[in-house]
Amino acid sequence: MSETYLDHNATTPPLPAVVDTMLECLRGDWANPSSTHREGIAARRRIELARESVARLIGCRPRDLLLCSGGTEAANLALRGSLQSQPDRTAIATSRHEHSAVRETAESLGKSGTTVHWLEHADDGTIDLDALEGLLVAEGDSIAVLSVMWVNNETGVIQPVPEIGRLCREHGVRFHTDAVQAVGRMPVDCASLDVDLLSFAAHKFHGPKGAGGMFVSRGTRLTPEITGGSQERDRRGGTENVAAIAGMGIAADAAASWIASEPSPWQALERRRDDFEAAVREACPEVVVNGGDAPRLWTTSNLGFPRLSAEAVLMSLSERGIAASAGAACASGSLEPSPILLAMGVPEAVAHGSVRFSFSRETTGDEISTGVAAIGAVVARLARDLPAS
C-alpha cells in the first residue's frame, strides 16, 4: 500500500466499524432477505436499518430510497428509466463535464435516436443558468430528464444544484443529480431541494464498494433496468447485498455525525486544501489549479503541470509512496487528456499534465506535507529532463 494516499475521490478506505459489521453479516445474517423465515427476517432487518441511516444522511424518507450497486447503476437507471417511463418525452439534457456514467450513457442514448442537449458552461466550469433557462423554455416539454453532477469528480467544482432544480421544477422537467462526490462530504437535504433523483455510492464516504442508491421523489416513475425480482418496490430486481448495504448504513451514520459536528468541519478542510495548493505553487510556480476560479468542495485539488505528462508524474509519485490519479479512476488506463478538462477549456498541454489529488476527512496534515514535498521533487526532476524549448 502507498504510504500517503491522496486519491480519495476514487475510493475511501472503509471504516473499521464498517468492516466489522460486514463480517457479522457474512457470518451470521447471510440469509436471503426475501425469505419469510427467521433468518431471512434478520437479514431484511439489516437492510432496513441501513436504509434508515442513509435516509437520515441525505434528508429523505426511507421509502423514497432505492438501494442498488452504486453510482453507475443509479445514474443509468435515472437516464434510461426516465426515458422509458415517459414515452412522450424523447430527449435528455446533460453536460460534457459529467462522470462517464452519465456522459457515456447520454452518448449511447444519442446513437440510439434520443435527442441529447449538451448544456453550456460559464468559464469557471459551472452551468450557465441563463442558457439553461433558455433551453428549458424552448425544449422543456420534450426533455425526460436533465442530469447534472453536484460535485465534479475531477475538479471538485460545485454546481448550483438548488438553482438548477428550481428552474427544472418551474418548467416541469425531471432533475437528476449525480451526488456521488457530495453525499457524506457536505450537507445534503433532499427534502429542501427541487430534485427528483439523487444518486450516491457508499465507497465515497468510507463505506464498501458494491453498495449505493438513489433518492426517488414521491410520484417519480422509473422503468427498471434490472428485472427478474420484486425487490426495491419493483424498481430493481435481484437479491440484495446484505453485508454491503449494512456496511453502508454504518458509514452513513458516521458521516452524518461528522457533518453535524461543530464547528463546521469542512471549513478547516477547505483551508487545508488551499494551504496544499499554495505550498505546491511555491515549489512549482508554473502549476495551474484547474477549476480554481469556481466554488469547489474541500476534497479535490486538480493541478496541471504544463509540458509534463500526468503518467510520468503519477509513476514518479507512486515510487515515492504517494497515491494520486489523473482524473476519474474509471478512465485511469487512458493516456488521453481528461475530456472534462478539455470541455472546461483547459489547454491540452496543461490537461495532459494534470493530476488529481483528493482528500478525505481522515487525511492528516503529515500526509499533506509529505505529498507537497514529493510533488516538488518529482516535478523538478521531470522538468530537468525536458528538452530545451
Image (cartoon, rainbow, N blue to C red):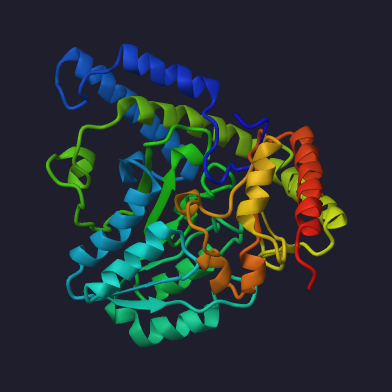
Identity of the residue drawn at 24% across and 59% down: 81
Residue 179 pos. (x, y %): 48, 53
Residue closest to the eye, 262 or 28:
28
Residue 186 pos. (x, y %): 59, 47
Hey, which residue is sitting farthest right in the picture?
A: 282
Is 107 left or right of 227, judged from the image as shown? right
- Seen in the picture, residue 345 relative to 52 is either above or below; the reply is below
Q: How many marks?
A: 0
Identity of the residue drawn at 47% across and 45% down: 59
Could one spot residue 375 in this view of the protein? yes
Q: Quadrant of the C terminus?
A: bottom right
Q: Based on the displayed image, in which of its 4 quarters is residue 173 positioned?
A: bottom left
Identity of the residue drawn at 20% across and 23% down: 32
Residue 24 pos. (x, y %): 38, 14
Is 159 left or right of 49, judged from the image as shown? right
- Seen in the picture, residue 177 relative to 271 is either above or below; the reply is below
Is 315 left or right of 18, judged from the image as shown? right
Identity of the residue drawn at 61% across and 61% down: 157
Is 164 left or right of 353, judged from the image as shown? left
Could one spot residue 322 in this view of the protein? no
Q: Quadrant of the N terminus?
A: top right
Residue 269 pos. (x, y %): 73, 44
- Seen in the picture, residue 81 relative to 203 is either above or below; the reply is below
Residue closest to the eye, 368 or 183:
368
Q: Based on the displayed image, in which of its 4 quarters is residue 256 positioned?
A: top right
